[in-house]
Amino acid sequence: MALTRPPLVFLFLVLACDRPGTPDQASPPKPATSPAGPQLGGLRQLALQTPPGQGPIEARILELQELVRRQPDKHDAWILLGRTWIQKARQAADPGFYANADACADVALELRPEHPLGLDLRALVLMNAHRFADARDLARRALAKDPDDLMALGNLSDALLELGDFAAAKEVTQQMINLRPGLPSYSRAAHLRFLAGDNVGAKQLYRLAMDAGQGSKDTEPLAWVTVEAAKIFLVEGNLEAAEAGFLRALDTFRDHPAALAGLARVRLAQGKFEESAELAGRSFLLSALAETAWLHGDTLTQAGRVDEAKLAYAKVKRLGEHGEGRVWAAFLAARDEAPEQALSTAQAELQIRGEPYTHDAHAWALYRTGALQEAKAAIERATTHGTRDPLLLFHQGAIRLAVGDRGGCELLREARRLGLHFPIAAALELSRLSARCAPSASAG
């Protein structure tokens, strides 16, 4: 499984100066037990749903809900409420709360059609739903009204990258840095550097992002970029530095799901299978992602808990077939299961996104079906920017070898040197293919 990065759809929420003015006479938080009045019907009911939990985010939601009950025409308050629902979704690792945020966007756009803040909020929701083309178009509409709309620039950068327009995403990210250097802009630039094969530059930019995120009351974005930096050390085979990064993220934000998953990969590479399985299981309970279920299945397999592993792998199927098509295609292709289904799933994903890891899943599915020349073209698209991910190197090397290009052996050797965190199926296959590159095999 590739160490992919979700869109940065939330990081602007840490910028207080990017928010509309916070009402200074809001009522103190109290339970939102009374139903909304008749003037707040329809989707507003969803926006005013009582949030589960009793932390600061929930208190803020209740405070803003009380405000919009008293002043239902206050546009900025609906925007703030929607953004706070997104913070809730992020901190709870529950995408269901994006529906509450979307309801706020509906109200805001009803009150002030085409207002950039409402368009920005809706675009954040669309990004989470993998409706990248729609998010791109909304971001452009917002920027037509306000070219310095930092959130719209972020949404546009993310959407363009997911759609495979690397050059345009890079240009928009540079606009962000010029406008306001900080955690959101630096972290996007870092990811683009990583995809371009510049791991050193990527780590430097993540360092700037982490420095910019210090002191924020919302510590989750800082933990998130710390995880992203640690992932680079992991794909470089530096387990010690990766471990330090994931632990630091957990110190910053307790039980951060991505940090737990990253640490599970480190423990798996270290042969600490039971601890790895426990960490991956905790991560999945906090954030039910297909990629984490796959990792959990691998850790359970290595720990000898085969029946439990089967249950974890079944979750990959369930989640993959309901929204996580890229991971599902990669899972099937990695395990050489149902290659035609892997291919059709990857092809469907290519209709909505075109970043390197979708092209990689497509290439590996083509390889499994025996369409080697098509697989070669697809893996070249996946690696066109020079990304130094060992899983991409493995797939590129295997496909080149399959079409008779012995240059694939060097790629396989590099992948084997770096790929300490590989899924079980990939690690076994890489070992087998590497044997074909040994001098004796070449002589024979």
Image: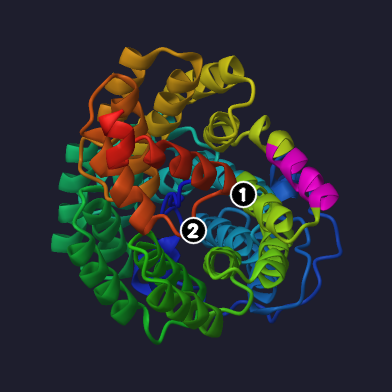
Q: Residues within 10 Å of mark 2 (few under 14, many from 20)?
A: many
Residue 99 percent across, percent down from the top left: 65, 45
Quadrant position of residue 30:
bottom right
| Residue at screen point 50% across, 39% down | 429
Q: Amino acid at mark 2?
A: His
Residue 440 percent across, percent down from the top left: 31, 38
Q: Amino acid at mark 1?
A: Tyr
Q: Is residue 64 above or below residue 300?
A: below
Of the pair 85 and 440, the residue shown nearer to us: 440
| Residue at screen point 41% across, 55% down | 419
Pointer 1 residue: 98
Quadrant position of residue 36:
bottom right
Q: How many marks?
A: 2
Magenta range is 306-316
Q: Earlier in the sequence, mark 1 or mark 2?
A: 1
| Residue at screen point 47% across, 82% down | 248
Quadrant position of residue 159:
top left
| Magenta span: chief secondary structure | helix
Q: Nearer the viewer, mark 1 or mark 2?
A: 2
Look at the numbered disc 2 and give the secondary structure of its residue: loop
**Relative horizontal placement of residue 59, taking residue 203 as reference (left or right):** right
Cα gap from disc 1 to disc 2, whole angstroms: 32 Å
Pointer 2 residue: 421
Of the pair 61 and 27, the residue shown nearer to us: 61
Residue 11 percent across, percent down from the top left: 41, 62
**Relative horizontal placement of residue 261, taking residue 218 as reference (left or right):** right
Of the pair 67 and 397, the residue shown nearer to us: 397
Whether residue 142 can be seen here: no
**Relative horizontal placement of residue 265, taking residue 383 as reference (left or right):** right
